Amino acid sequence: MDNLDAARMQMAFTLIFHIVFACIGMVMPFFMVKSHYKWLKTKNPVFLTLTKSWQKGVAIFFVTGAVSGTALSFELGLLWPKFMLHAGPIIGMPFSLEGAAFFIEAVALGFYLYGWNKLNEKFHLATGIIVGVSGILSGILVVSANSWMNAPSGFDYVNGEFLNIDPVKAFLNPAWFTQALHMTLAAFAATSFAVAGIHAWQIYKNRNTPLHKEAFKIAILFGAIAAVLQPLSGDLSAKDIAQRQPAKLAALEAHYKTERGAPLYIAGIVDEEKREVTHKIEIPKALSFLSFGDFNAEVKGLNDFPEEDRPPVAITHYAFQMMVGLGTLLMFSAIVYFISIKKKHWQENKKFWLYFALLSPVGFLALESGWIVTEVGRQPWIIYNVMRTKDAVTPMPGMVYSFYMYVLLYITLSIAVTWLMVRQIKTLNRTKI
């Protein structure tokens, strides 16, 4: 394994883990606050128990996200020094603001955790809201830095030098809004369905059912709304990619030939040597319409791009298909839940709870697929059309050992978090209301 492969593997591995910790840390405070609000309104002890249980989960993922995120920030300098040399002054602002948001979140979380029976009830609740809002802002700021890599702006690139730097313009780059919106909705859908699925499993097993039903209702509401809105966000993202990154669009659809009225491919097996897709379902002219709002619009195929500028087609296409397919499943499941509010007898059937329990990992599988699409689809560029990934990697030898070290770190974190969360669920099941 050479330096480039080791660096890519390490970055991919750590992102795959960190994004889960980060998304849960962003979204769970809102469950906690909603339950806390219900406790203040009803004084039902179920909500107090649930709030205090969820606040422990928020604390666990806050710490885990801090550790994994800090390690990830070191990797940027360790693995990609040439990238940071030029990109640091340009995208330093969102990273600095993210640090400020993280600090506010930490202070607010401290007030929340230790403020029971010490702070005014409304102020105590407000600190929980600040935890959630700060977490979302942190996520948006980090995504802004990533979106700059897809839509570099705020500088002039002259003879290999980055001149006339404008950090605000870089922060508000053309891709930041669509990526931030899509990522935020994905975080809510993934985390909400995961949490709802865990509580649905407890209901299916008939463990402390009244408490888990209230938990399920809080979590699934956030997830169902996000899942229904996500396709609209996806449409905005697709149109943005079609305008700015036509090679990525072609890779998403494994579309090799430039044509007007281009069909949309569902599923299919990619043969990169023959440059074709077999065993696919074609929807005539749908790709042109979804990309440009015109059934006869021209979609540029991969054959029109130099081979060295093409993304890896197979992995990008399969990840995109998985993201869309699983996202559609979550949207359908959200509709099922909304119908079940009216048809209450659906929730009396144990299969209903088993169905939502099985959905628990689906949102995060879709989320991971989406990040593969974003990152792999941009290749071979680390800064799109400006700097290639191979030109940014560190020359330091032995990077494979760093990769193994990070694998050990993140596996250890995952085992610790899993053990803590299992213990939390068991404690919750033993709680007498």
Image (cartoon, grey):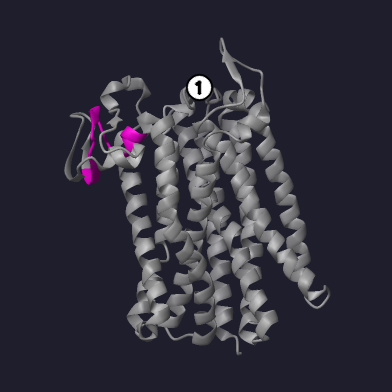
Looking at the picture, does residue 271 appear above or below residue 337? Answer: above
Is residue 168 magenta-colored? Answer: no
> Label 1 amino acid?
Met
Q: Residue at x 63, y 23 (%)?
A: 85
Q: How many marks?
A: 1
In this rendering, position of residue 354 left or right of residue 215 = left
Of all residues, the one furthest to the top in this rendering is: 159
Give the farthest residue toward the bottom: 433
Residue 302: percent from left, percent from top: 29, 27
Residue at x 66%, y 22% (from the top left corner): 165
Q: Is residue 286 above or below residue 48?
A: above
**In what quadrant of the picture does the N terminus appear?**
top left
Q: Quadrant of the C terminus?
A: bottom right
Residue located at (34% from left, 33% from top) = 312
User: What residue lies at 62% left-to-right and 53% top-to-bottom?
Assistant: 136
Position of residue 73 measured from the top left corner of the image (x, y, whole percent): 62, 39
Label 1 residue SS: strand
Where residue 405 appears, as percent x and y from the top left, is 55, 43
